Image: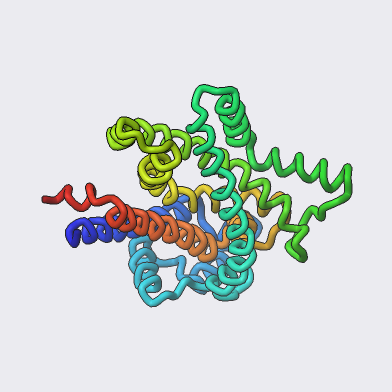
Amino acid sequence: MILLFSRACGRAAVTLLLLVTCVFLGLRLTGDPAVLILGMEATPDDVLAYKIAHGLNSPLYTQYWRYLGELCHLDFGLSYVTGLPAIQLFTNAMGPTLRLMLPTALLTLLVGIPLGIVAALHSGTKLDRGLLFISVLGFAVPNFFFGLLLILFFSVWLGWLPTYGDASLLHYIMPVLTIATSEAAIFSRMARSAMLDGLSLPCVQAAHMRGFSRQRIIWLHALPNALISLLTVAGFFLGTLTAGAVITENIFSWPGIGRLLVLSVANRDIPVVQLIVLGVGCSLIIANLLVDLLSLVVNPKLRGTTR
C-alpha cells in the first residue's frame, strides 16, 4: 500500500515538472513576446527596455531556473498587459468558473451515469439503441455549435434567456446545458460499458445461480464493480470540463478562466497564460492522484499487486 502510494505521488511529481517545462518552453518558442506585445513599429531601444523590465533579456536556461525558483516561492509574476499580479487575475476569474463548473458537474453525473446504467440493463432493446443514439449525438455536436443553437433559439427567437454575463440564475442555463450535454453523453457511454462488464463478472453469474433477486444482484454486485471502473474516467472528467469551459465561456462572455485564457493568449500575456495552464494541469494531476489513491481503497485487488 505504501509503495503504491509512493509510486503514485512520484508519477504526479514527474508529470508536474514536465508540465512546467513544456509550458515554459512552448510559450517562449512561439516568438519574441516583447516584439509581439509592443508591435513591429517599436524601436530596438523600446524592445530592449521591455525585456530588461520583465527579465526577458537573459538566456533561456537562466529564465527557466529563475522561473522554477519563483514557482517554489509561489511567485507567478506580473501581467505584461495590466501590470497586476498574475495570481490576482487568476483568482478573480476562478470564482465565476467554479460557479459554472459545479452545477455542470452535478448535472453531468446525475444524468450521464443513470442513463448509461439504464441502457446497460436494457441492452439490445429499443431503449438501449435510443439512449445510445442520443449519447453519440450529444458527444458529436461541438460545444460552440450547440451553444450558438441555444442562443439562437432561447435568446433570439424566444427572448427567454440572456446571452452573456453571469448576473442572474438565468445566465447559467445555456452555459451549463452546453457543457453538460457533451459531458453527460461521455459518461453515459462509459457507464453503459462499465455496467455491462459488471453484469458479466463471475460473481454476478454465481449470484444468478444462487437465485438472488435481480435488484440485489444489480445493487450489491454489478453496480459497485461498475463504479470502480468509472473512477478512472472521473480523473479525466475535470480536464474535459475545463476544456469545454474555454469555448463556452467565450461564447457566452462568461468572465471566467476560459475567457481570461483566450484574452491572455491573444495579448501574449505569458505570466497569466502560464499560471492558467499550470493551474488546470495541476488540478488534473491532483484529480488523477486522488483517483489512484481512491482506487486503492475501494479495490483490494490493486493493493495486492505488490505482494
As rendered, which of 45 and 92 lies closer to the eye?
Answer: 92
Instruction: From the viewer's perspective, tell me whether residue 19 is left or right of residue 119.
Output: left
Instruction: From the viewer's perspective, tell me whether residue 120 is left or right of residue 155.
Output: left
As rendered, which of 256 and 305 lies closer to the eye?
Answer: 305
Instruction: From the viewer's perspective, tell me whether residue 78 is left or right of residue 58.
Output: right
Q: Is residue 58 visible?
A: yes
Q: Is residue 21 visible?
A: no
Q: Residue at x 59, y 75 (%)?
A: 84
Q: Residue at x 40, y 66 (%)?
A: 58
Q: Quadrant of the N terminus?
A: bottom left
Q: Where is residue 280 drawn, in percent x and y?
A: 48, 58
Q: Where is residue 151 drawn, in percent x and y?
A: 79, 45
Give residue 74's quadrant in the image: bottom left
Give residue 211's quadrant in the image: top left
Q: Residue at x 30, y 60 (%)?
A: 13
Instruction: From the viewer's perspective, tell me whether residue 222 is left or right of residue 307.
Output: right
Q: Residue at x 31, y 58 (%)?
A: 293
Number of numbered markers: 0
Query: Outermost residue, front direction?
Result: 211
As rendered, which of 4 and 123 lies closer to the eye?
Answer: 123
